[in-house]
Amino acid sequence: MITRFLWQGMDRNLRLFVLLVLAVGIALPLLNQLTPPGSAFHVPAWLMQLMGKYLCYALLALAVDLVWGFCGILSLGHGAFFALGGYCMGMYLMRQIGSRGVYGNPLLPDFMVFLNYKELPWFWYGFNHFWFAMIMVVVVPSLLALALGWFAFRSRVTGVYLSIITQAMTFALMLAFFRNDMGLGGNNGMTDFKEILGFSVQADGTRAALYFASALALALGLIVSAAVVGSRFGKALTAVRDAESRMRFLGYRVEGYKLFVFVLSAAMAGIAGALYVPQVGIINPSEFSPANSIEAVLWVAVGGRGTLIGPVIGAFIVNFGKTWLTGALPEVWLFALGALFIVVTLLLPKGVVGLWGQIKARSQVRKARALA
Amino acid sequence: MRSTSALLYLSGVTVSFDGFKALNNLSLLVEPGEMRAIIGPNGAGKTTMMDVVTGKTRPDSGEVVFDGRADLTKLDEASIATLGIGRKFQKPTVFENHTVRDNLLLALAGLRKWHRLLLAQPTKAETDRLAEILAIIRMEERQHMLGARLSHGQKQWLEIGMLLAQDPKLLLVDEPVAGMTDVETETTAQVLREINRTHSVVVVEHDMSFVRALGVKVTVLHEGSMLAEGTLDQVSADQRVVEVYLGR
């Protein structure tokens, strides 16, 4: 039943795309590990790390699209779920440092010693276990989404008001995490990680494994999203997006639909954040900054809202542009971002993925005219 | 809560918006199997009455009882719809990004809970019922067409199909002939009479010739209360009704 559920949403294009993600996920680490540096086929570690980061962004974009593209909930706070997942991973990595920190305290991370903590705060218990941290990566963002969604959807907060609430949520969390007495590293966040599951986070082999894990997570995210969207639940979900009150008068309790997809999406964003942190080597409160969440929405808009492949492509395009422009012409990047938003809104309402359909429709019109 | 044999029972219902009384001590009875037309000038409270019955608006006071057992003032839209009250809006609202078939599937009575729908596969009974409805509304060939691509008239038909799929005990129809030609108006009256063979219907309408074509008991609303009730000829002869419609 589970396999049938997972296969029901997969059309041919998506199946190929998932295979492509997995192929890239396997090929890059292999080329990195098996070919000597200097060979034409060698993939340098920095490129793999960069691609790994993009894969995490792509998973975040997919999560945003699941609620925005398929349920019409424009969340401007998904960066918060991403950051919370990242913090859970960061707490695990901090506790793996042990006595190798600057202060050499076997139990307390450096920042706690610095701030005169006498003992580990209660919410750090358990994070020395990998399995516990991984459960928290999913549970913490999900619980926040559940609480926020439960109140918001029950009170029928929709549209721009809901967007503002999610934006306020991530802003409030950013301010909270900036405080030193939160016990989560304050404005410096957490960094200087040493090991994950006993492997050095700096080692090329570990990087290759993390990169592959990101590709795998994205592939699974695509499969699960496709299954949800392709089910009868998914039909009801898009109907809620298009005509919510009509669904109520048909007897659907739409809160349940929104809440499920919001929580699922938050969990996906949390997993993306957890995979992101060991690859970039740091997590700090700026990950909660509202601009991050808005950028994630932009990736979806560029790639194609309401499609599953679109957000992945959008995340890659925008972030390649960002990496390149912030290196080549740093002062131009924000203008380019603004221009991109205008271009997409005016010319590409369905994003890059929709461009294909637009071209096809236009050529059909031309053919029809030629015949007439 | 009063026990009553009426299908829909409204008693002393008052709704006010910022001091304006949209409904003022309104009482109304609809018997099982009946078709009732509700007329009245703009602002008489016709749409507010529908909102109260379907759970969109909560009355400040008064009783609203469905089927002699359910207190509608305590339930939300989804529960009321599940009890068997369907609503057709003035503007045809079908799901534009869904095919005709999926529109009907979503409306089909039965599964509504999100966790059941995740794994649900169409059953034989559902497939048969869909085929039946597609035949009734004559849209078998268009069943895979998107709602957005249907013409205005086709959307009306699809919406009627969705109501049939929902299979409500009571059907509330809001201004079904607004913007229709005379021929279409006549056809719609026929369709409603057909539906009335198996369902109770309440029609809100402005158009007098349409109400005449329905040939049913008429309730006249004015300023949120019932002004007159009877056949169309009776209420047209009522001096107060004439005053309300022609202005004092």
Image: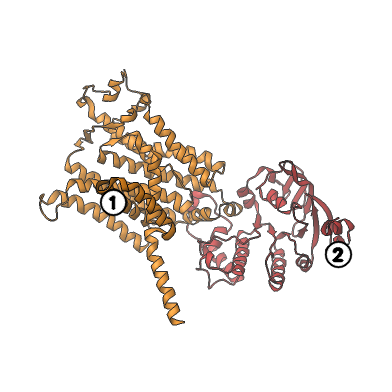
Chain colours: A orange, B red
Q: Position of residue A290 (x, y in %)?
A: 41, 40
Residue on which disc 2 sits? B233
| Callouts 1 and 2 on one subunit | no
Q: Position of residue B159 (x, y in %)?
A: 61, 63
Number of labelled discs? 2
Residue B190, above or below A273:
below
Chain identifier of the residue bearing label 1 in the image: A
Q: Residue at x 26, y 40 (%)?
A: A280
Which amino acid type corresponds to the residue marked 2 in the rendered image?
Asp
Is residue B94 found left or right of B3 in the rendered image? left
Is residue A75 found left or right of A122 in the rendered image? right
Q: Position of residue B43 (x, y in %)?
A: 75, 52
Tell me the SS state at disc 1.
helix
Displayed quadrant of residue A364: bottom left
Q: Are marks 1 and 2 in contact (CB under 8 Å)?
A: no
Displayed quadrant of residue B189: bottom right
As drawn, the label of residue A123 is none
Task: Bin the neighbour count of mark 2 within 10 Å (Cα to Cα): few under 14, some 14-19, many 20 and up.
Answer: few
Displayed quadrant of residue B202: bottom right
Residue A10 appears in view:
no
Which amino acid type corresponds to the residue marked 1 in the rendered image?
Phe
As drawn, the label of residue A320 is 1
